[in-house]
Image (cartoon, helix red, strand yellow):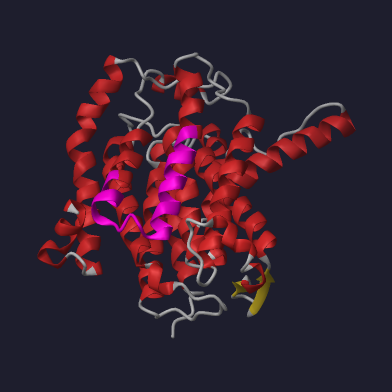
Amino acid sequence: MLIIYFQNWFYLNNLFLRSIIILLTSFLSIIFLGQIFIKKLIQIKIKQSIRTYGPQSHLLKVGTPTMGGILVLGSILINCIMWCNIFNKFVLILIFVIISFSYIGYIDDHKKIIMSDAQGISAINKLLLQIIFGMITAFFIALAMLKNTNITYFWQIFDNFFLFDRSIFIPFINFNIHLNFWQFVILTTFIIVASSNAVNLTDGLDGLVIFLVAVISLSLALLSYCFFKGLLVNKFIIDYSNDIYELTLISFSILGASLAFLLFNSYPAKIFLGDIGSLPLGALIATIAIIIQQEVVFFIMSGLLVIETMSVLLQVIYFKLTKQIFGKGIKIFRMSPLHHHFELLGYEENKIVVGFWILNILLVIISLCFIEMK
């Protein structure tokens, strides 16, 4: 009741005003607590471990406090509880994403820091947990889309199964791909897991990935607002736009927290996100994009994350393939992900980061050109 009282106080039911407030509170909370949090991490020796086969310049970063994702995701979560309607079905889904993927990141960081294992948990175990939580998220998104269905009673989905018809619009060829329930769950799980890992892989240079998350979250905030106001063309049979307004607030919360953390994470970084930050942030922005039905647009605006991920996949596949054929593995890049390749070519870290920032902004602008407005 206290939360509802404060939300109504000074007309906080106004979406625009609430967006400004949640943006500022997310930003200022990290600004005020950031230095205190860093000092605490140093005291309890929560420090970054560096892979021995990584760029030699990164050895200078050994000892830098990590697990800054606790501060970022904690700020987002607390502000969601304070300023959002926590009984909104999409808010509940996003809270689940934050907690579940943060748990995966915590396990990984705990093994790296406490157990002094720079590799963390095995890739298979991490992927398995991501798929499980991603599938649960996809299931509840699909359930939330069904008409006259309360997310609390998940078994009702079987009574309304035949109603489910979700389309993905391909703007380049003006074509709709229709998905049934299970096709949607599988595709959604893939997008969430891929985005989570992409942000994690890209988080290798000071300030790089947190800025990308900030720009993407700003775009998602604008898109969710347009969706709520009915400004976007709705090509889908199931309409739930009346419940979408809270996503604007959460997107602005991510934006505020990311910009504030950038002040501490930019070159030279005083603190790193850690997997506890990068994994849930990637899953979070993907989930918002899926809910507002902008998967293709999200793919374009996240193009840099896609490129970074593909550089790793291509490196591994080509190396193993040439090893089988020629008996000796050949690398496409000097090191993957791609930002490490440019490091080994002699480019300065801050130049690479700024260059990637610019590319990301361009991709976001291009992606927004494909948005169809009414």
Q: How many marks do you count on the picture?
A: 0
Residue 307 horizontal side relative to residue 72, left or right:
right
Q: Which span of residues is magenta-colored?
A: 78-103
Q: Residue furthest left?
A: 10
Q: Position of residue 162 (x, y in %)?
A: 67, 71
Q: Is residue 356 visible?
A: yes
Residue 48 horizontal side relative to residue 344, left or right:
left
The residue positioned 25% from the left and 28% from the top of the image is: 37
Q: Residue furthest bottom?
A: 374
Nearest the eye: 245 or 302: 245
Nearest the eye: 299 or 71: 71
Q: Which quadrant is the C terminus positioned in?
A: bottom left
Q: Is residue 194 visible?
A: no
Q: Position of residue 22 (x, y in %)?
A: 24, 55
The residue positioned 36% from the left and 19% from the top of the image is: 46
Main SS category, magenta section: helix
The residue positioned 66% from the left and 63% from the top of the image is: 181
Nearest the eye: 134 or 339: 134
